[in-house]
Amino acid sequence: MRMRYRYVTYRSREGSQKQLEQHYRQLLDEALRQGQQSILQQSITWRPLTDILESAELIRVKIELAGMREEDIEVTLYEDALVVSGERLDIHEAQEGLSYQEAQIRYGPFRVEVFIPRPFDHDAVIARYENGMLSVDLPKLPAKKVEQVHIQGIVKQE
């Protein structure tokens, strides 16, 4: 969220404490209004809270996506990455005079990119969305066995 700040110098002036409080209240209202406008623009891509767990057999990625519908979430697999994207919409009834007192829920387009450092079985990936949590299980492929390579000597030609 971008906010503008103004540097204000206060001088002792004729006036009451009430006028000073009113001036501070106007500054605060302006800052809140600017914050509300940037929230409503919803043009910035955000990243939902994500947990990445790993065991010997799999990597599990859990993403908090409360309020989303399953069909609004896109899960894309690459050779070495998982990308989850979509857009959470703020669907509420507009009421005149109703404005945000506090806004902590993120809306708009989101994107999570998770680098997967080990090969995984693309055909066995399981994605589940339940109670606002997306869980993607990426089963690891077995590690290749280490092989010793015999070094051949150079044959001299006569």
Image: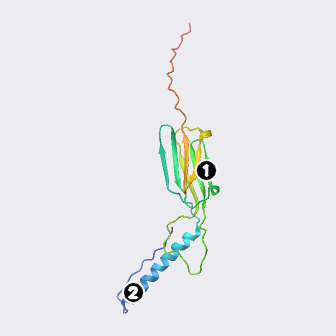
The residue to which callout 2 is attached is: 20
Q: In the displayed orientation, state which residue is furthest to the left.
A: 12
Residue at 60% in and 71% down: 92
Q: Residue 134 in the image: x percent, y percent? A: 55, 52
Is 52 rendered above or below residue 43? above
Q: Quadrant of residue 156?
A: top right
Q: In the displayed orientation, state which residue is furthest to the front.
A: 131
Judge by depth and name the residue closer to the eye, 7 or 113: 113
The amino acid on which the numbered mark 2 sits, given as a three-letter code, is Leu
Judge by depth and name the residue closer to the eye, 147 or 90: 90
For mark 1, does the 10 Å Cα neighbourhood hold few (<14), some (14 to 19), or many (20 or more) residues?
few
Mark 1 / mark 2, whichever is N-terminal: 2
Q: In the displayed orientation, state which residue is furthest to the bottom.
A: 14
Q: Residue 82 in the image: x percent, y percent? A: 57, 47
The residue to which callout 1 is attached is: 75
Is 106 rendered above or below residue 36? above
Residue at 55% in and 69% down: 39
Q: Are marks 1 and 2 in contact (CB under 8 Å)?
A: no
Disc 2 on helix, strand or loop? helix
